[in-house]
């Protein structure tokens, strides 16, 4: 009997009377906890309002049209789905430019398209303006991208090689002016830069690690013994027993409460800039697009779980000193999935890296504290001309960072 069958058999036992009885029994214990959490949340919201960064999006929404979707075949015959958007003029017209900026986005695990890049995408479009080309792709095995013939061909290195295929399909031999990665995308971006340093001009890496992701997950201060092995074993059990549908069960169980939760989060912590630009429900839509995409079919749910295994098996830690590209690192102090101490290692080993540690965000800094992310992106891009490329893979560091 699997978990879903057990849940279905248990459900008739929990009639309305039983539920009311359980609620009355648990209420004296839950109410104080709820009140403490509510007080802490309100206090944190006040602190956040007083000290958060400021940044305004001034370009109109028409400058960022919905991306075009197309497909390309990789060297091993996998059909990839990719997305491309070109920043337009204020009137919505398509500009012409001989040397456009090219931004390659490496998505977090489970994200489809450009929809959840939010403030980071808007800030880049605002700074570089009309003609900027924005590209991302759905990783092999996810969504409309095909599975390879062999599961072994799904890993971070293959994702990075697919990124080059997509880049060439869109802009030919032109390099990416900027590579942006979040979460899993950080490892993909690092691998891409090590494989093809001549194709990268600079990087912005958000809330990620350099490798062995499960060995530091849920360990915000230091590594603890056996935590990584336990997480890996749980994922292996889910896949071996065919329990990936648990993700869909969790989504359905949480769905009635998600709207209220994100309404409160937007009210207390929401970005005024992103609300004006993307709408007041931007947080809720981002969540629905993310988790709804993962649970859209069994293939994507399995790929999501296997993705954690791939991230744990991969590492670029021993090669970080070979990366001298100008790099902005942004870590959330409350990030329990990829703790900030992993980005401190990256800062220490990468010659031209600058680390921003945000005290007001967790794993989704671009959504939790977008004003800071957008302001730091603007500052970073303004400093890029100070870096001089000496070789295809080496940059000269400016006197002052």
Image (spheres, rainbow, N blue to C red):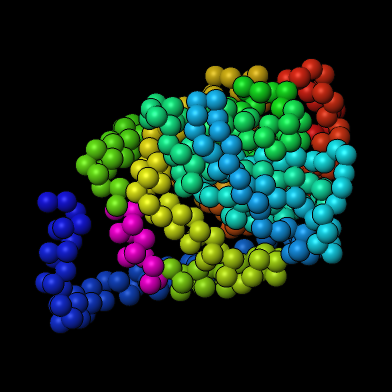
Residue 330 at what x, y percent from top left? 64, 43
Residue 37 at what x, y percent from top left? 42, 68
Q: Nearer the viewer, residue 213 or 189?
A: 189
| Count of picture labels | 0
Q: Which residues are magenta?
A: 246-257
Residue 271 falls left or right of residue 400: left
For residue 299, above or below residue 156: below
Tell me which residue sits at (27%, 71%) in the image: 29
Q: Where the C terminus falls, by quadrant?
A: top right
Residue 116 at what x, y percent from top left? 58, 55
Residue 8 included in the magenta stretch of the image: no
For residue 335, above or below residue 16: above
For residue 265, above or below residue 296: below
Q: Quadrant of residue 224?
A: top left
Visible residue check, residue 207: no
Q: Quadrant of residue 167?
A: top right
Tell me which residue sits at (40%, 46%) in the image: 300
Residue 257 falls left or right of residue 198: left
Visible residue check, residue 246: yes
Tell me which residue sits at (85%, 26%) in the image: 388
For residue 303, above or below residue 226: below
């Amino acid at each position: 009997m699997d978990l879903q069958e057990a849940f279905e058999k248990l459900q008739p036992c929990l009639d309305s009377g039983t539920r009311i009885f359980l609620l009355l029994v648990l209420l004296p214990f839950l109410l104080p906890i709820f009140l403490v959490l509510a007080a802490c949340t309100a206090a944190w919201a006040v602190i956040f309002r007083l000290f958060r960064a400021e940044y305004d999006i001034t370009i109109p929404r028409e400058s960022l049209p919905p991306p075009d979707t197309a497909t390309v075949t990789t060297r091993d015959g996998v059909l990839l789905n990719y997305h491309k958007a070109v920043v337009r003029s204020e009137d919505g017209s398509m500009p012409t430019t001989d040397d456009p900026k090219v931004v390659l986005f490496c998505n977090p695990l489970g994200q489809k398209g450009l929809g959840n890049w939010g403030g980071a995408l808007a800030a880049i479009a605002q700074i570089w303006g009309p003609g900027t080309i924005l590209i991302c792709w759905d990783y092999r095995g996810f969504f409309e991208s095909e599975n390879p013939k062999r599961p072994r061909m799904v890993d971070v290195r293959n994702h990075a090689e697919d990124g080059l295929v997509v880049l060439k399909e869109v802009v030919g031999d032109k390099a990416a002016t900027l590579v942006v990665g979040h979460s899993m995308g950080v490892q993909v971006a690092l691998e891409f830069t090590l494989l093809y340093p001549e194709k990268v001009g600079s990087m912005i890496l958000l809330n990620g690690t350099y490798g062995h992701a499960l060995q530091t997950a849920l360990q915000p201060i230091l590594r603890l013994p056996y935590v990584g092995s336990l997480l890996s074993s749980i994922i292996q059990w889910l896949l071996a027993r065919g329990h990936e549908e648990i993700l869909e069960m969790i989504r359905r169980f949480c769905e009635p409460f998600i709207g209220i939760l994100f309404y409160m989060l937007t009210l207390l912590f929401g970005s005024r800039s992103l609300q004006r630009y993307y709408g007041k429900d931007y947080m809720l839509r981002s969540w629905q697009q993310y988790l709804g995409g993962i649970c859209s079919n069994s293939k994507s749910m399995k790929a999501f779980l296997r993705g954690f295994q791939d991230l744990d098996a991969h590492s670029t830690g021993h090669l970080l000193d070979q990366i001298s590209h100008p790099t902005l690192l942004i870590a959330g102090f409350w990030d329990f999935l990829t703790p900030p101490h992993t980005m401190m290692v990256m800062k220490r080993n990468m010659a031209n890296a600058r680390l921003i540690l945000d005290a007001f965000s967790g794993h989704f800094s671009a959504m939790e504290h977008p004003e800071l992310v957008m302001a730091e992106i603007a500052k970073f891009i303004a400093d890029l001309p100070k870096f001089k490329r000496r070789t295809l893979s080496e940059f000269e560091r400016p006197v002052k960072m």
